[in-house]
Image: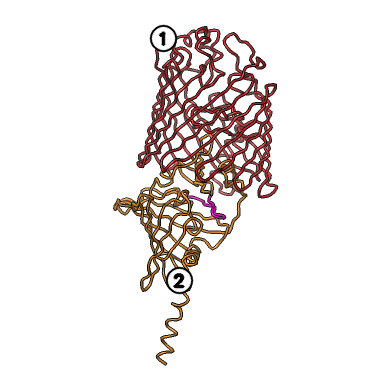
Amino acid sequence: MKIIFIILLLWSYANNAIADIINQASITTHSYQLKRDGLWAIPAVSKNLTLAKNTQVILALNGDIKGFEYQLKYATLNKKTTLQTLFYIIDLNDYLSIQIGKFIENWQLGYAFNPLGLTDPYHPINNTDDLNEKLGINAIAVRYQLENVYLDFYLSNDTKSRDNIRGYGYKSRGARLNYILDENTDISLVVHKKSDLSTGFGAGFRRIIGDNTKLYGSFFTRHGTIIPNVSHKNREKDGNQYTNIMLGWHYTSDNNISLIAEINQDDRGLSPEQYKTLTVENLNLVRPNGIRQRYIFWRLGKIINDHELSFSRRSSEDKSALNILEWRYNLTANLQLNTTYSITTGTTGSEYKSYFPEQQKSSLVLHYYFDF
Amino acid sequence: MQLLLTILLLLPLTVFATMNADELLTATDQYRSPYRYAKLELRIDEYKQGLITKSQHYTVYHQEGESLVSVVDGANKGNRILLSHKGMFIATKNSSRAIRITPIQRLLGQASYGDLAGLHFSKNYTPSILKQTENTFILELIAKKSSATYHKIILSIDKKNQQPIDAMAYLISGKLYKKMHYEIADNLIKNITYTTKNKHKKTVMNFLTVQNKKIPKRLLSSRGMRNTIR
């Protein structure tokens, strides 16, 4: 598979006729080094984690062949070619279409927190999938649109190994209604059922205010959750209502300074009392979005010509935080550099100092985009 | 004889004098694209001190007042911008989803997203004739909705053939934000030069090709804008 992939990439670059089936091809080199402290440094734990230092190359292609849209990548880290998406869209008429195959269905509205990310389990921590990590799910979606209304019906069967924490490996079905109130405002209403869990409901909104500001928010609520708690108790049918809610604000100044702030309350996380009972045996509960209930996120960014600098901070309710400094630079029209430094702060025993596997991380990513 | 000559000379003017502001603007729009559903290939050249510092290619699909812009080359290849009746959205190639753009985000950059996506003035602006000179009409265009890129545009058009000559774009605060100058060839806009108060910089939007092309309506939505255009 990978030989065919490389041949296709090189042949396409040399032969413009084949370029019709490739929209974008890129080579990414990713180097990182990270430091683990505390519980994560225990050999019995760290042996199951990713390497502390590594460099990999990722070859990525996306395009369409006779209407079949695809995205695939080859990564040297695991020496594996992954078909991330492969789907087809049938246009029945101007208003009705069907999408079938393996694809990423995204109902999210937030930057860092996404109560409506029900159909898309993986959320990159900085909202950009630089390493092509997002994976499609086998699904069918029927889409209907009128002038101001979009309606999606979604049915999926995720065949990955079941992962309670990251939300993979489930059948799900849902519907989303997106209504455009005016040119500045839209609202979403969502209903979703996941495997044996009860049906849940949610809603969201986005509103442009004035010239510089966006306000947005969403929530989702359901009886039961697939996420276990510290006693490994199955909470799928415990009769409790779990609500995940987010409110966000995004301001862009006249000279392109961007400020994002979000607040999140997720009932599925550990309460302060439950958090106190957390031990090394529970490290498998650690989720990418955090293990507690309340978080604040903010991000300050500035674009200056071909440079983008940003600083973001995700804080837990115990005041510990994950801090990320990032610099993106377009070296040439086709070559982009992305360097990131992240560090956790907080007191001993706090969430990000004790229960986040990457205490310090330096990362360098170089992307080269081929022109076809 | 002299009277007859005078009448014959004045006749064309009476024809134009009967064209109202809406008709003038619609006639001017034809120089952007003669098609109801259009696909345009554009190249944006950024100049500093008279030299090109950066070039980028775009493909723009216009239909029924809505536009989908696709970045064709460079580091931003794969980015899409949608200007629809429901607002403006951007979907960057590696991001999770399309996001709404605020009015100020539409303006950022020498040639802004709004400049790329906006095609026919008549769809987004209400015109009135401000004044006329011997050879030109000066139209005042006021945005119909807040989703228009600029609040007001003062547009000069040729009296004889309604070709656009130049324009000045204003924000809602009344601030002059950009000037545009049009170059026409073969009855179509060949390029638009954008200048701001920074005299050392300018941006030229070159119209390379224009063709008749209709795309599925689902692509002109925030959820469908990232799909392949076929």
Q: Does the magenta-highlighted stretch encompass residue B215?
A: no
B49 lies left or right of B164: left
What residue do we see at 60% from left, 51% from top? Answer: B215
Q: Colour of chain A?
A: red
Main SS category, magenta section: strand
Vertical position of residue B16 compared to residue B109: above or below? below
Q: Is residue B67 magenta?
A: yes
- Chain letter for orange? B
- Magenta region: B58-68
Report the chain holding disc 2. B
In this rendering, the answer to whether B71 lies above or below A196 is below
Can residue A313 be seen from the camera position used here?
yes
Q: How is the image coloured?
A: by chain
Locate the N terminus of chain A by quadrant. top right
A54 or A242: which is nearer to us?
A242
Numbered tag placed on residue A348 in the rendering: 1
Chain of the residue where label 1 is placed in the rendered structure: A
Q: Nearer the viewer, residue B101 or B191?
A: B101
